[in-house]
Image: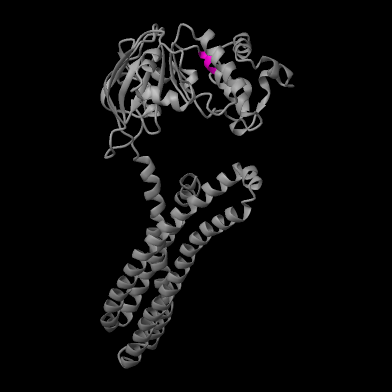
Amino acid sequence: MNRLSKEIDVLDNTLPIFVNNALTNLAQVVTTMIVIIASTPIVTLVIVPVMGMYYFVQLIYITSARQIKRIESSAKSPIFSYFSESLNGVSTIRAFRKQARFLKDCQSKINFAARAYFSNIVMNRWLLVRLETLGNLITLAAAIFAVAGRGTISPGVVGLSISYALNITIMLNWLVRSTSEVEANIVSVERIQEYIEEKQEAPWSIEGKMPSITWPSEGSISFHDYQVRYRPGLDLVLKSISCKILPGEKVGIVGRTGAGKSSLTLGLFRILEAAGGSIDIDGVSISEIGLHDLRGKLTIIPQDPVLFSGTLRINLDPFDNHNDADVWRSLENAHLKDYVSSQTGGLQSTVDEGGSNLSVGQRQLVCLARALLRKSKVLVLDEATAAVDLDTDDLIQATIRTQFADCTILTIAHRLNNIIESDRVMVLDNGIIAEFDHPKALLKDKTSIFYSMAKDAGLV
C-alpha cells in the first residue's frame, strides 16, 4: 500500500518539482557566479574553497538524509498494516477489552515514524545554519575585495557585484536543498524499482505447450523426486517426494505441524516452483505449461474461504462460463439454495469485502458451490472444514463423496475422521513420505506414525 500510494505520488508529483527546482537553481547560481567573478576576479580565491566546503556539507547532509528518508518510508508501512488489521479485528479487540494495548502499539508505531520525520527536520536546520554561514562568507569576500579595489573598479560594477553576492546565499541554499531533496526522494524510485525487478511468476500461457481442452481427463498425479523450498537459500521443505496417485483415488494427506502438507498443495498449483524433480498430471509435466492452463484445470477448497466484494454470482462464476441453471444446481448441491433464494437479490445479492456479511460456514459452502460448478478432475481440500462446525463439516463431506465420486481428491486433514475412509493415506514427516498405504493397514501397525496420530485423536 505504501509503495502504491506514497511512493508513486512522490514519483509522479513531488520528484519532478524538485528536479525542476534543482536545474533552475543551478542555472541561477552559475550565472550569478559568472557575474561576481567577472566583476571582481580576485573573489575566485575565496569562492573556490567555499564551494569545496559547500560540497562537503552537502555530502554529509545527503548521506544522512537519504537514510532517514528510507527509514521514514519504511516506518509508514507498519502503520497502514496495523491500522487495517485492527479495523478488521475491532470486534475481537473489544470483546477481549484490549483497546488500550492496541492503541499503545499503534501510537508506538506512529511515534517511530514521527521520530524519523523529526530527524529530517533537525537535519534541515543543521544544513540551513551552515549554508547561511558559507553564503555570507562569499558576500563578505565580494564586499571586501570590491572596497579594496575601489581605485580600479567602477562604482557601478562594485554595486552589481555586491548586489549579486547578497543573493548568492539564498540561491546556494535552495540549490543544495533542492539537489538534496532530489537525491533523498530517489529512495521512492528505488523502492518501486525493487518491486519492478522482483522475480515474476511463470507465463500465464505458453504458446505451443497448451494442454488439450479435456485435460486432465483421468486425474492421475505422479511425483518424481519432487523437491521444493520457499525461497533460494532456505532448506528444502519437501525432499524427494516420489509417488503416484491413481485416477479417481481419494488420498488423505496428514502429518504433524511443519511436515510439508500445505507445501505439497502450493507445489501442485505452482505457487511454489519446484527446486528439483517434477509433477505430472495425466502424463503432462505441470512445469511445462502456463499457470492459467494449470490452475484453471484444478480446484481447491482452502481452509480460509476466499470471497470478494461484489455479487454472489461473481464469486461463484467470476469468468461467466456457466448459465444460471448450473449455478443454482451447484448451490443446491452445496445446501445453499434455500438461503440464496431467501435473499432479496438472489444470485445478485451483495457479498461484502471478504464475505463479512456471511458466516464462516456459509462462506465455506460458497467455496464448495464454486468447486461444484468447476467440477475439475482434480480436487484439493486444504483442511477445508477445519474452521466450521461439525454439522457443516458433515454436509461438506457428504457432498464431496457424492458429487466428486469420479474425481481425484487430495485431502489435507485436520480431523482424521475425514480421511479414515480414504483409499490411501499419505503421512508426511519432515518433508518426506514416511507412510503411504490404506488407512486400515496403517492402523494395524501400532508403530506407525498414523496409528499414533489416530490414538491421539481418540480414533483407536
Q: Image height check: is 292 above or below 110?
A: above
From the viewer's side, name the closer residue of 164 and 73: 73
The secondary structure that most of the magenta stretch takes on is helix
| Residue displayed at 62% across by 47% down | 93
Residue 26 forms part of the magenta stretch: no
Q: Image height check: is 231 above or below 345?
A: below
Read off the magenta span.
Answer: 370-374
Quick check: 41 left or right of 453?
left
Question: Residue 249 placed where, x, y %?
Answer: 40, 10
From the viewer's side, name the closer residue of 350 and 6: 350
Residue 372 forms part of the magenta stretch: yes
| Residue displayed at 52% across by 47% down | 81
From the viewer's side, name the closer residue of 348 and 157: 348
From the viewer's side, name the closer residue of 149 and 165: 165
Question: Residue 118 placed where, x, y %?
Answer: 49, 67
One can see residue 42 in this view: yes
Quick check: 398 left or right of 167?
right
One can see residue 13 in this view: no
